[in-house]
């Protein structure tokens, strides 16, 4: 009996040791598995961030309440501009930062709900906010809700090229030929950045003087880029600044159409005239072809030292940009290179204000 009891004792003891050992192995296994799972999550999250740059916090989301407070309830006293897409307000954020707030017209919001609005709107604004160039106005954030789409932009207290050329009596004289060349080159550089550097590229959709802001140093900043998806078939404010094929494009514009718009802007800079729905193209092209520069150029300005060569080159670039055939139009990079050379040439000659 005593021998049997000893055998049972040792058997139970061995069983307990094996059981303890089993639980130790199981505990270690669970710890290792948890560690590997966490590592995989980290790797997956890092990979997701690399594959989806749009999820980066590039543009700050604001609540509609914050925007309402910042604009004093969208007070008329805060309005600093009105355009085809919406009304722009000067706003003061909770932290004291002064910004420009564009409130998209309700008819475009309702038309794009479920198409370009909702998550699509926020994704597009995050993408556009990646733009970082001295000739492109920065997008800082956005806000959205039922019937509301808001774009928050940097505010620099700037007036538009349209104001200088066509609204302010003294504006044209402030923009002498040197400054006009500087504006032209700046717009071309900004478009080149949007077309060729941004990835994926950004089509402006409506390049015109009211979408070009001029700062105190007379440098140009392009605004309202990439927002034509909100109103792809809207003709008001677009006619005269896009080519005929624009209306066949469902997404609201192309690089070629942007180059056409730049060409019209160059013609306005040269002549001081408005586009008038595209009539400026029909009026100016014969004059450029026959080199009748005295009839083409803005009569409010004197040509420095009677050196008309830079303006002739600028006119020829404008003519090429508004070519009827898209395949014959220059690429924005080619336009920017020529205008940069012209800007440098006039600056070095000292015949214009810079």
Image (tube, helix red, strand yellow):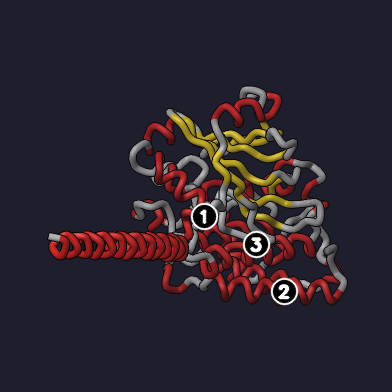
Residue 19 percent location from the top left of the image: 26, 60
Residue drawn 26% across and 59% down?
16
Depth check, mark 1 against mark 3: the one in front is 1
Disc 2 secondary structure class: helix
Q: Based on the displayed image, in which of its 4 quarters is residue 136 positioned?
A: bottom right
**Measured along the vertical axis of the image, is residue 170 above or below residue 327?**
above
Q: In this view, does 187 lie to the left or right of 307?
A: left
**Would residue 48 be visible to someone looking at this image?**
no
Q: Are marks 2 and 3 in contact (CB under 8 Å)?
A: no
Q: Percent position (x, y) of residue 164? A: 74, 47
**Mark 1 neighbour class, 10 Å CA radius: few under 14, some 14 to 19, many 20 or more:** few
> Mark 3 sits on what residue?
133
Helix, strand or loop at label 1? It is loop
Q: Residue at x 58, y 71 (%)?
A: 289
Residue 189 x %, y % = 63, 66
Tell me: 8 left or right of 114: left
Quadrant where the N terminus is found in the figure: bottom left
Residue linked to disc 2: 342
- In front: label 2 or label 3: 3
Asked whether disc 1 touches disc 3, contact meaning CB atoms under 8 Å apart, the reply is no
Label 2, label 3: how far apart the Cα atoms are: 21 Å
Residue at (52, 69) in percent of width and height: 196
Helix, strand or loop at label 3? It is loop
Give the mark toward the camera: 2 or 1.
Answer: 1
Circle number at residue 56? 1
Q: Where is residue 93 in the image (x, y as percent from the top left)?
A: 68, 35
209 lies left or right of 172: left
Q: Earlier in the sequence, mark 2 or mark 1?
A: 1
- Tag 2 and tag 1, C-beta contact below 8 Å: no
Residue at far front of view:
2
Front in this rendered view, residue 166 or 193? 193
């Amino acid at each position: 009996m005593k021998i049997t009891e000893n055998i049972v004792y040792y058997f139970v003891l061995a069983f307990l040791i094996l059981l303890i050992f089993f639980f130790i192995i199981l505990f270690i296994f669970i710890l290792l598995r948890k560690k590997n799972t966490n590592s995989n999550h980290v790797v997956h999250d890092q990979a997701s961030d690399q594959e989806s740059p749009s999820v980066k916090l590039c543009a700050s989301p604001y609540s509609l309440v914050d925007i309402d407070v910042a604009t004093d309830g969208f007070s008329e006293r805060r309005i600093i501009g009105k355009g085809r897409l919406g009304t722009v307000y000067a706003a003061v954020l909770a932290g004291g930062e002064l910004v420009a707030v564009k409130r998209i017209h309700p008819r475009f919001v309702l038309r794009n709900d479920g198409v370009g609005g909702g998550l699509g709107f926020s994704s597009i604004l995050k993408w556009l906010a990646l733009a970082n160039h001295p000739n492109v106005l920065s997008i800082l954030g956005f806000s959205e809700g039922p019937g509301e789409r808001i774009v928050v932009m940097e505010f620099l207290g700037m007036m538009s090229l349209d104001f200088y050329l066509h609204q302010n009596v003294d504006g044209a004289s402030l923009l002498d030929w040197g400054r006009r060349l500087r504006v032209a080159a700046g717009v071309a550089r900004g478009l080149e950045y949007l077309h060729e550097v941004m990835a994926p590229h950004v089509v402006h959709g409506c390049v015109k003087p009211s979408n070009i802001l001029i700062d105190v140093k007379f440098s140009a900043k392009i605004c309202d880029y990439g927002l034509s998806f909100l109103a792809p078939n809207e003709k008001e404010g677009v006619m005269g600044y896009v080519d005929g094929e624009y209306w066949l494009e469902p997404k609201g514009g192309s690089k070629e159409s942007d180059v056409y718009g730049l060409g019209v802007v160059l013609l306005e800079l040269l002549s001081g005239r408005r586009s008038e729905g595209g009539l400026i193209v029909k009026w100016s092209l014969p004059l450029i072809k026959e080199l009748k520069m005295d009839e083409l150029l803005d009569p409010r300005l004197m040509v420095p030292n009677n050196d008309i060569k830079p303006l002739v080159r600028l006119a020829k670039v404008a003519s090429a940009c508004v070519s009827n055939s898209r395949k014959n139009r220059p690429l924005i990079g080619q336009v920017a290179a020529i205008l940069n050379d012209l800007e440098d040439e006039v600056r070095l000659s000292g015949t214009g204000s810079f």
